[in-house]
Image: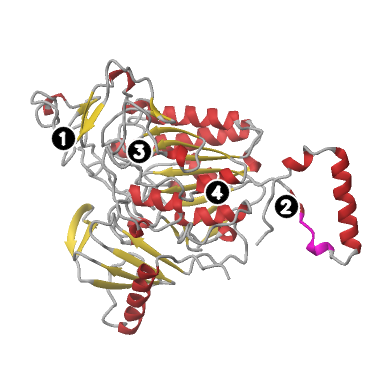
Amino acid sequence: MPSTPQSTSKIFSLPHCFALVQTCIFVLLCFGGISVADQPTEQSQSAPPNVIVIMADDLGYGDLSCYGATSLQTPNIDKLANEGIRFTNGYCSASTCTPTRYSMLTGNYAFRTKGTGIAPPNSPSIIKPGTETVASILKRAGYQTAVVGKWHLGLGGESGPDWNGDLKPGPLEIGFDSCFLLPTTNDRVPQVYVEDHKVLNLDPADPLWVGMKKPAEDHHTGITHREALKMDWSHGHNMTIHNGISRIGFYTGGHKARFRDEDLADKWVEKSNAFIQQNVDKPFFLFFSSHDIHVPRMPHERFQGSTTMGYRGDSIMQMDWCVGELMKTLDRLQLAEKTLVIFCSDNGPVMDDGYKDGALEQLGSHRAGGVLTGGKYSVYEGGTRTPLITRWKGKVKPGVSDKIVCTIDIAASLAALTDQSLAEDACTDSLNVLDAFLGEATAKGRDHLVQQDNGNNGAFGLRVGNWKLHKYGKNKARNVVVEQKLANTKKPDYQLFNLEKDLAEQNDVLADNPKIADELKKRLEQIIAAGRTRPVSP
């Protein structure tokens, strides 16, 4: 593993006399018996890279052409993969959005913390101030930090968000210098932007109210005014209507602050490019949190009809465009060789997730999960094994890696990259797999990974080597693909699969391998009980 890069900006800002003293000390140390091999390498003396984490939403393992899709082409993400490392065993830690985002930022498995399931519209801040995060680690290392896009990790104190006041605690209290957010997720109200601590463009004379009870008998909903919808709902998404689409939850007011669904991706790119431009001469960390391809899928008009797969396919093209725009900015500012880019997804795919948008009907021969079974909400591989790509031009040798890595490992790996120590109680499940992210020949990656569903069903998957144990707390597996339709299917308490022989997890071999199954059961229980998996420092 290469030496950890360190910033030299402070050295160059010191007076020349101090630099001369440093040189003298260096010479004395060398003659004092310290070998050249003990001195900092050229890489360790260079500044650590900027970091951009691009997280797609509900993107499946088979949704990109660089991962085998043939029904559409994703040239910008393909280029990223061709210039970097495409992981075939890249994972998120949960098969829904809130727990994966929580785990990525904190380095802790979400199942260890109550309240980390899919966050409701008025959820208080889930990551509490003082929690170590990827952002706080890099801020401590001298980075400017920002999150742009979907948040869905709650805002405000225990009573929830004050939509007409200061929305804190939030991202700025856990290490981000700035934020420009979709506060929840776009199938949940409200449809407004949050910039730092405020709802953007909110008129005090038109206050915003958000709740889960109908505010008035004549309030328009997807049930009472279904004929007015431009995208019909299939289940659950039938409350307040905005932009011709009904959502989960109710809200009133804030009309000047409301956005148009079709403009979200453009706004994320605009704000992200502005942040990069503002920090061209400073190290920066950008969490670009896309809403594509989550429901409601309503891509900009210029992408509508760009594929044969309806709005879901069109939203993949929009997301690919976003990646291309960010990479163009890095090229224009000559930052491509100074920036580590990590592309990932928060969970696997889903077709009908509450709206009649043609995702299933227009799917054709496309397989969003590739050869994998399951998707969003499940602990099958299709729920958590997703596209994962790293690129650092000039530093990372392009190729394909079969090492097991997970988005939960971003925290510890970037701490190592920037020479930041972690407290024993911080990032307790994040492993330092920096060598794998950077494509080192000696990299081993993870030796195990716990996968979870949303947490409501208590389902877990434990992968150790090529063995995969399923545990079902409520005897149910969600989102199993049956003839391209999603269904809840009854499952035994445990299942065991050999991924080397059965990547699609079709053949339960628990009865033939009771000893292995027992070992994995014990290990899973130990991991859950221990409260951590990151080794304690000696």
Type of amino acid at the residue the image marks with label 3: Leu
Task: Quickly name the residue at label 3.
Answer: 155
- The N terminus: image quadrant: bottom right
Residue 137 circle label? 4
Residue 460: x percent and y percent?
31, 64
Type of amino acid at the residue the image marks with label 2: Gln
In the rendered view, tell whether residue 115 sits above or below residue 226.
below
Numbered disc 1: secondary structure: loop
Toward the viewer: 106 or 18?
A: 18
Q: Nearer the viewer, mark 1 or mark 4?
A: 4
Is 410 on the left-hand or right-hand side of 231?
Answer: right
In the rendered view, tell whether residue 166 sits above or below residue 309.
above
- Mark 2 vs 1: CB contact within 8 A: no
- The C terminus: image quadrant: bottom right
Q: Nearer the viewer, mark 3 or mark 2?
A: 3
- Mark 1 vs 4: CB contact within 8 A: no
Mark 3 and mark 2 lie on one chain; the one further toward the N terminus is 2
Disc 1: CA contacts within 10 A as few (<14), some (14-19) or many (>=20): many
Pick out the residue farthest to the top: 205
The image's colouring method is secondary structure
- Mark 3 vs 1: CB contact within 8 A: no
Residue at position x 73%, y 40% from top? 9
Inspect the magenta stretch and tell me whether residue 219 lies in it. Answer: no
Spatial CA span between label 3 and label 2: 40 Å
- Mark 4 vs 2: CB contact within 8 A: no
Mark 3 and mark 4 lie on one chain; the one further toward the N terminus is 4
Numbered disc 4: secondary structure: helix
> What is the magenta range?
36-41
Residue 238 circle label? 1
Residue 43 circle label? 2
Toward the viewer: 9 or 435?
A: 9
Toward the viewer: 414 or 76?
A: 414
